[in-house]
């Protein structure tokens, strides 16, 4: 191949990869919802949502910074776990745990009070089969 042909091939490959990966569309997230094994995450000030549908043997140890302009948060857990277990932890800006529950504990809960600022939402699923779904919102 000549260098001109190589450049054209490289440009065509770049365009094909950009289209295949959804790049350049200006859209973030998946407007139709997450695919199995792919989380749907909305992380806005005072409102964090996480939905991970239909996972099999899912384990991880990760977290997300979240801005809370209040001093407490309301946590709504609505996961559907067939097997495995996991923990949801919320930390205040100082790193203190203000909420900790198993994913299987459904319902709406209020965190302990903490300072406003950048909180941290941590999830620790271990061999989860099912759907992990929760929301954390400013309570006051």
Image (cartoon, helix red, strand yellow):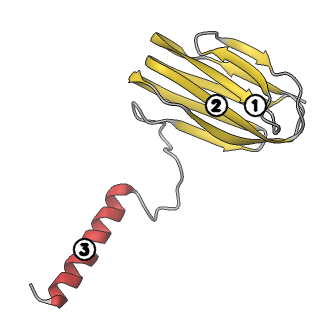
Residue at mark 1: 91
| Mark 2–mark 1 CB contact (< 8 Å) | yes
The residues tagged by marks 2 and 1 sit, at their Cα atoms, a distance apart of: 8 Å
| Mark 3–mark 2 CB contact (< 8 Å) | no
* Quadrant that contains the C terminus: top right
Closer to viewer: mark 3 or mark 1: 1
Tell me which residue sits at (69%, 12%) in the image: 107
Residue at mark 2: 122
The residues tagged by marks 3 and 2 sit, at their Cα atoms, a distance apart of: 41 Å
Residue 59 sits in which quadrant? top left
Q: Nearer the viewer, residue 134 or 97?
A: 97
Q: As drawn, is 5 to the left or to the right of 63?
A: left
| Residue 59 in the image: above or below residue 92 | above
Q: As drawn, is 51 to the left or to the right of 76?
A: left
Q: State how many labels appear.
A: 3
Q: Position of residue 29 (x, y in %)?
A: 52, 47
Q: As drawn, is 63 to the left or to the right of 17?
A: right
Tell me which residue sits at (23%, 84%) in the image: 7
User: Which SS class for mark 3?
Assistant: helix
Residue 92 sits in which quadrant? top right
Q: Position of residue 115 (x, y in %)?
A: 90, 36
Tell me which residue sits at (86%, 28%) in the image: 72
Q: Mark 2 vs mark 1: which is more N-terminal? A: 1
Residue 124 sits in which quadrant? top right
Residue lying at the far front in this picture: please name it. Answer: 95
Q: Mark 3 vs mark 2: which is more N-terminal? A: 3
Residue at mark 3: 12
Disc 1 crowd, CA 10 A, few/some/many (<14, 14-19, 20+): many
Closer to viewer: mark 3 or mark 2: 2
Q: Mark 3 vs mark 1: which is more N-terminal? A: 3
């Amino acid at each position: 191949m000549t260098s001109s042909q190589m450049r054209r091939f490289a440009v065509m490959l770049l365009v094909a990869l950009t289209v295949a990966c959804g790049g350049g569309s200006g859209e973030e997230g998946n407007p139709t919802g997450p695919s199995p094994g792919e989380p749907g995450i909305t992380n806005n000030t005072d409102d964090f949502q996480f939905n991970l549908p239909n996972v099999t043997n899912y384990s991880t140890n990760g977290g997300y910074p979240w801005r809370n302009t209040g001093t407490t948060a309301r946590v709504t857990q609505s996961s559907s776990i067939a097997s495995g277990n996991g923990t949801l932890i919320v930390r205040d800006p100082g790193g203190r745990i203000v909420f900790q529950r198993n994913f299987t504990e459904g319902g709406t809960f209020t965190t302990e009070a903490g300072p406003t600022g950048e909180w941290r939402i941590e999830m620790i699923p271990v061999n989860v089969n099912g759907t992990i779904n929760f929301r954390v919102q400013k309570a006051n």
